[in-house]
Image (cartoon, rainbow, N blue to C red):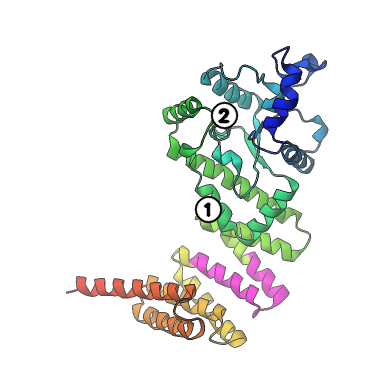
C-alpha cells in the first residue's frame, strides 16, 4: 500500500467532514510540541517502507527517538483542497516549514533509482533545505541501507556518478503548472545548473558522513581499512587529494602489517597512493612507488599477471605525463604485447592499452609536426 493509498483509503475518509489535516482531529493537537523534523518523501512509496526508513534512521541516529516530532505532509496538511490552492501557497508552506523546523530527513527509496530524484516537489524540498541552511539527512529502509553500504564499499564511483547525474530541470510533477512554477522559482533564484551543483554537493557530503560513521563503527581493522579506502576514493573523485592522502597511507601501512608486502590488496593500496601522487603531478613520489609495485608483482605473480600489467601501464602513463616519451612508448608496447597474447585483441584491457598507445602516437606525431 502506497502513501497515496493510505490517504485515499484511510486519511481522506477520516477527514472528509472536517476538511482539515488529520493531526488537527487529535485531542492533543492544541498541546502538541513543535515539529522537529521535516520529512521529504514521495507519495508513490510503499507506506510501510516509508515508516521503516524513518523509524530506522531515528533509532540509529537520535539519542531520544521518543522525543521526535515529525512533519509529514500526509498528516499535517489538509489534502482536500490541494487542487484549488495555488503553487505559491504550497511553495511558501514547504519553505516556511523547512525554515521553521531546520532539519530535513529525505527518504531515499530505492537507493539505486530514488523516486525523489524523479519528482519536482522533492527536489524543491531539498532546494528549500539548502536555501534555508537547514540540516540535511537521508533515511533508507534497513534492507536498502544494507544494499547501499555494500555498493558504496565495492564501487563508490557508481554512487558518486548517480548523484553527479541529477538533472533537476527534467523532474516531473503531478500537475504541469506545478512543474512550470517550480522551474520559474528556480530560474529566478539560483538557476538549474547551480541547483544541480548544490544537490550534488549536498548528497556528496551526506555520503562522506555515512562512510565516516562506518569508519567509527567498524569493529575490526580490516573493515576500517575498507571504509578508509572508500572515503579516499570519494575524496579523490572530488580532487580533495590532501584529504585522501592520509587515508591512502593508513591503507598501505595497515595492509602491509596485516597481509604483507606482496599481497594483492597491499599492492592495490600502494597503487592507489601512487595514483594520487600522479593526479597531483608529483611524479617524484609516484614513480618509485609504481616501480616497487611492479617489482613486487613480477616476483609474486609473474609478468603476465593482470596486476603486473596494471603497473606497467601506470608507469607508461606516468612517463608520458613527464614527457619521457621513449620510455612511455616502450612500456605501452610491452603491456599491449602481453595483453594481446594473454587476453586477446578484443578484451577491454587490451583495447584500453591500444587507446593509450594510439594517444601517445598521435601526440608524438603532433609534436614532430610542430617542430618542423
Q: Residue at x 80, y 38 (%)?
A: 63
- 254 in the magenta segment: yes
> Looking at the image, which is closer to me, 267 or 16?
16
Q: Would you say residue 71 is visible in this rendering?
A: no
Q: Which residue is mark 2?
A: 132
Residue 229: x and y, percent? 63, 62
In the image, is 341 to the left or to the right of 371? right
Residue 48: x and y, percent? 75, 38
Assign the C terminus to one quadrant of the image.
bottom left
Give the image quarter of residue 127: top right
* Magenta segment main secondary structure: helix
Residue 145: x and y, percent? 70, 49
Is residue 34 placed above or below 325 in the rendered structure? above
Q: Residue at x 65, y 66 (%)?
A: 251
Residue positioned most to the top: 18
Alpha-carbon distance for marks 1 and 2?
26 Å
Assign the N terminus to one quadrant of the image.
top right
Residue 221: x and y, percent? 74, 64
Helix, strand or loop status at disc 2: loop
Q: Which residue is mark 1?
A: 161
Q: Residue at x 58, y 44 (%)?
A: 203
Give the image quarter of residue 262: bottom right
- 252 in the magenta segment: yes
Q: Which residues are magenta?
A: 250-277
Q: Residues within 10 Å of mark 2 (few under 14, many from 20)?
A: some
Amino acid at each position: 500500500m502506497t502513501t497515496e493509498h493510505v490517504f485515499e483509503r484511510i486519511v481522506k475518509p477520516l477527514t472528509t467532514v472536517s476538511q482539515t489535516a488529520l493531526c488537527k482531529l487529535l485531542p492533543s493537537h492544541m498541546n502538541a510540541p513543535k515539529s522537529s523534523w521535516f520529512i521529504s518523501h514521495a507519495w508513490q512509496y510503499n507506506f510501510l517502507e516509508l515508516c521503516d526508513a524513518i523509524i530506522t534512521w531515528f533509532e540509529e541516529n537520535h539519542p531520544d527517538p521518543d522525543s521526535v516530532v515529525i512533519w509529514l505532509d500526509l498528516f499535517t496538511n489538509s489534502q482536500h483542497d490541494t487542487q484549488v490552492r495555488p503553487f505559491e501557497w504550497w511553495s511558501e508552506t514547504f519553505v516556511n516549514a523547512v525554515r521553521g523546523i531546520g532539519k530535513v530527513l529525505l527518504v531515499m527509496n530505492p537507493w539505486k533509482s530514488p523516486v525523489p530524484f524523479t519528482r519536482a516537489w522533492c527536489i524543491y524540498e531539498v532546494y528549500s533545505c539548502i536555501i534555508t541552511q537547514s540540516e540535511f539527512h537521508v533515511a533508507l529502509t534497513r534492507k536498502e541501507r544494507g544494499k547501499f553500504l555494500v555498493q558504496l564499499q565495492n564501487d563508490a564511483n557508481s554512487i558518486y556518478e548517480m548523484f553527479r547525474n541529477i538533472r533537476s530541470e527534467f523532474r516531473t510533477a503531478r500537475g504541469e503548472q506545478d512543474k512550470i512554477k517550480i522551474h520559474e522559482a528556480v530560474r529566478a533564484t539560483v538557476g538549474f545548473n547551480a541547483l544541480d551543483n548544490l544537490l550534488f554537493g549536498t548528497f556528496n557530503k551526506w555520503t562522506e558522513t555515512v562512510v565516516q560513521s562506518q569508519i567509527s563503527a567498524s569493529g575490526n581493522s580490516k573493515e576500517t581499512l575498507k571504509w578508509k579506502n572508500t572515503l579516499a576514493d570519494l575524496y579523490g573523485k572530488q580532487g580533495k587529494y590532501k584529504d585522501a592522502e592520509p587515508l591512502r597511507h593508513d591503507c598501505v601501512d595497515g595492509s602491509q602489517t596485516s597481509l604483507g608486502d606482496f599481497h594483492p590488496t597491499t599492492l592495490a593500496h600502494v597503487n592507489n597512493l601512487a595514483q594520487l601522487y600522479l593526479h597531483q603531478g608529483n611524479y617524484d613520489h609516484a614513480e618509485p612507488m609504481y616501480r616497487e609495485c611492479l617489482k613486487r608483482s613480477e616476483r609474486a605473480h609473474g609478468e603476465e599477471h593482470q596486476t603486473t600489467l596494471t603497473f606497467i601501464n601506470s608507469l607508461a602513463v606516468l612517463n608520458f605525463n613527464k614527457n619521457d616519451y621513449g620510455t612511455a612508448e616502450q612500456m605501452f608496447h610491452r603491456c599491449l604485447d602481453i595483453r594481446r597474447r594473454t587476453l586477446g585483441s578484443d578484451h577491454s584491457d587490451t583495447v584500453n592499452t591500444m587507446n593509450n598507445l594510439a594517444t601517445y602516437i598521435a601526440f608524438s606525431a603532433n609534436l614532430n609536426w610542430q617542430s618542423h
